Image (tube, rainbow, N blue to C red):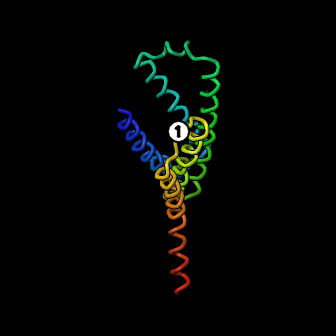
Amino acid sequence: MWILYATGSAFFAGITSVLAKCGISKTDSDVATAIRTIVVLVFSWVMTLITGTLSGITEISEKTLLFLVLSGVATGASWLCYFKALQNGDVNKVVPIDKSSTILTILLALIFFHEGLSLVKLVCVCMIGVGTMLMINRKEDVESNSLDKS
């Protein structure tokens, strides 16, 4: 079942980038982030009420709450940076850089959760890094080569 949720996450993250780029074309990226955050906040609480899990809030420990707050701060910082990058850059360059966070996540999971790192996984992580670099630099290389020939 987790794979369906992960696939849904990828789908919604993908359309989020395009919708966000459309939404920030004529507004400040910080204002756009604030509006998006309000929508996410309301949506999250509505889902909590619909699923009947609101009572679980009293069971959250202080340590768990601390990590959730820190995660929220990191998410907010990520969104502010992401929207500013989308406002000023091309979606097809911003998104691969943003999604390269996979590399950091895998390394942090290795350090903090002792999740294994096989040779295959290491090669794949390196390929994600190389692929990201090719995606953001390739167009510039092609354009500069065509200008050199003219």
- Amino acid identity at mark 1: Glu
Task: Indicate the secondary structure of the residue bearing disc 1.
Answer: loop
Q: Crowding near pointer 1: few (<14 within 10 Å), some, many (20+)?
A: few
Residue beneath disc 1: 115
Residue 6 drawn above or below residue 86: above
Residue under the image location 35 percent in, 37 percent down: 4
Residue 122 drawn above or below residue 149: above
Residue under the image location 55 percent in, 34 percent down: 37
Judge by depth and name the residue closer to the eye, 115 or 133.
115
Q: Residue furthest bottom?
A: 150
Rendered location of residue 79, percent (x, y): 58, 42
Rendered location of residue 20, percent (x, y): 49, 46
Rendered location of residue 25, percent (x, y): 53, 52
Residue under the image location 61 percent in, 40 percent down: 111
Rendered location of residue 122, percent (x, y): 52, 52
Judge by depth and name the residue closer to the eye, 144 or 63.
63
Residue 31 drawn above or below residue 67: below
